[in-house]
Amino acid sequence: MFGLSMAAFGAHALTAEQTRALAVGENEERIAALNASLARGDAGLAPFVQALLDGSVVFTADRVLIVNGDKVSDAATGAPAAKPEAAEEVINSNQMSRELNTAMAALKLFSKDLGEGRSAAQALKDDADDARLPLIEKALAVETDEALKVQLAQIRAAVLIASPDVERRMEAAKALGDSRTSATRSLIADRLKPAAEGGEADVAVRSQLEISLKAIDRQLAWGERFGVLFTGVSTGSILLLAALGLAITYGLMGVINMAHGELIMIGAYATWLVQNFFQAYLPGLFDLYMLAAIPVSFLVAALVGALMEWLVIRWLYGRPLETLLATWGFSLVLIQAVRSIFGAQNVTVVNPTWLSGGVQAMSNLTLPYNRIAIIVFAVLVLAAVSAVIAKTRLGLFVRGVTQNRKMAACVGVNTKRIDTYAFALGSGIAGLAGCALSQVGNVGPELGQGYIVDSFMVVVLGGVGQLAGTVYAGLGLGVLNKLLEGWQGAVLAKIMVLVFIVVFIQRRPQGIFAMKGRSAEA
């Protein structure tokens, strides 16, 4: 059960007196007996500690017994025994339970299961003390995994830093500099308090602690920088997904679609419906619901976009003000329709198991799986859209109509049909953005309102109709916004980004990439 490497322990098994000392008496006496047994490495300690934690230990005037269902055994010898009528159950206080759990974590350091050993080291990190030091050193001596050895060495150093021996404190001060964690930084900072307040008194040790603290600060600073960069890239990927469809519709038809944010919201609700369907009818395949939600969110948003183009937009081409007002009105209709059908409250989309958790890249930097997935998803969507535009017949027609609508019509291209197809494609991509956004926050009727302005800024900054410009602008604005947030806060960061875009457009009205092509009016 425990998988402990008994070669690390002595052959000494628990005696009847030792089991009684562990089970009966005041907390201080039991804790002292527990620490002594840990220091000796008693072979039978782990199962007995687990039995104490499980509440399976009883005692009489002369024996300590373990009760496991109908089976009763002597705690020291393991021999079968009959349960006496007058047995009293061992009761653990909160303090005793904490000590037993910490001891159990220390014992599991010797587990043959690497994952269990790492979990034990993590659990022991905040509760290690002098009493655990012999066991930690034994585990360090027999451990073969380098990462776990480093972790154990850091735990040992954290214990030794309070040693009365100056040389051991110096050794610990040097070792702590390799830890690179926030917890170790706090430990060193605490040791650097004035000696009168309980800090380090030795000058040489204090000097080494200061050197270690600077090394940790440098490492943590890099973790913070990489964290800001990753958050900026993930935010930029969301902006890219939100703006990519708008880049097609606005670039092709010059339509200022104020309902684009609501198409994002439609895609998010489609994902929520697929999730509910899997929960109700396919619970065993729930972790795969995202694979079904991606095409569903695309198709639903594309159909709504095609309907909007057919009902409203195609009658207003060449009239930008009327189009803006009409699409804004359509966005209000969509918001109210969703409120009436699904309610005004936000709904929650649960991440599948494979999108939960994250990668521990550095001690103070965890990369969430859902954010990594959004970045990868944005790259795949961008590659798919680029392939459609560059390699397909539809893409050829879209590029032709974008560059010169009248000439495309003259050579037989049905521009109205291309408008509908392109608008549906752009709307479907907005639905994919909603699918991705559902994995990082709640879904509500006004979800898209927060992205419509940012999407237009990305499209205008990148260059109307230019996918490459949309990529540069989306990622650039995402990273820039996060950098400015860390400096001036979220509100001022938004204002500064807006000012930057206004100044940039004043200097370069065509955006990062200018439209290429011939025009009869040129």
Image (cartoon, rainbow, N blue to C red):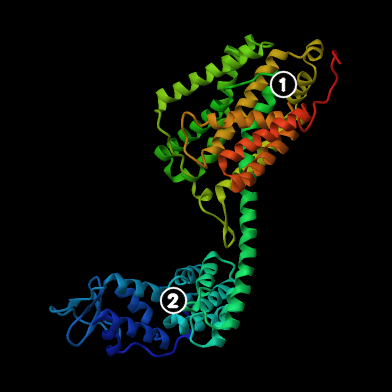
Residue for badge 2: 106
The residue lying toward the viewer, choosing from 511 and 472, is 511
Residue for badge 1: 252
Q: Amino acid at mark 2?
A: Ala
Task: Tell me residue 499's x, y (percent).
Answer: 67, 33
The residue lying toward the viewer, choosing from 315 and 424, is 315
User: Residue extending furthest left?
Assistant: 85
Kindly identify the residue that appears in the image at 61 percent across and 65 percent down: 217
Q: Earlier in the sequence, mark 2 or mark 1?
A: 2
Q: Name the secondary structure under disc 2.
A: helix
**Residue 340 higher or lower than 26, as above or below:** above
Kindly identify the residue that appears in the image at 37 percent across and 86 percent down: 37
- Image quadrant containing the C terminus: top right
The residue lying toward the viewer, choosing from 208 and 257, is 208
The residue lying toward the viewer, choosing from 429 and 495, is 495
Based on the displayed image, in which of its 4 quarters is residue 425 positioned? top right
- Real-space Cα distance between discs 2 and 1? 66 Å
**In the picture provided, is 455 more to the left or to the right than 339?**
right
Q: Amino acid at mark 1?
A: Leu
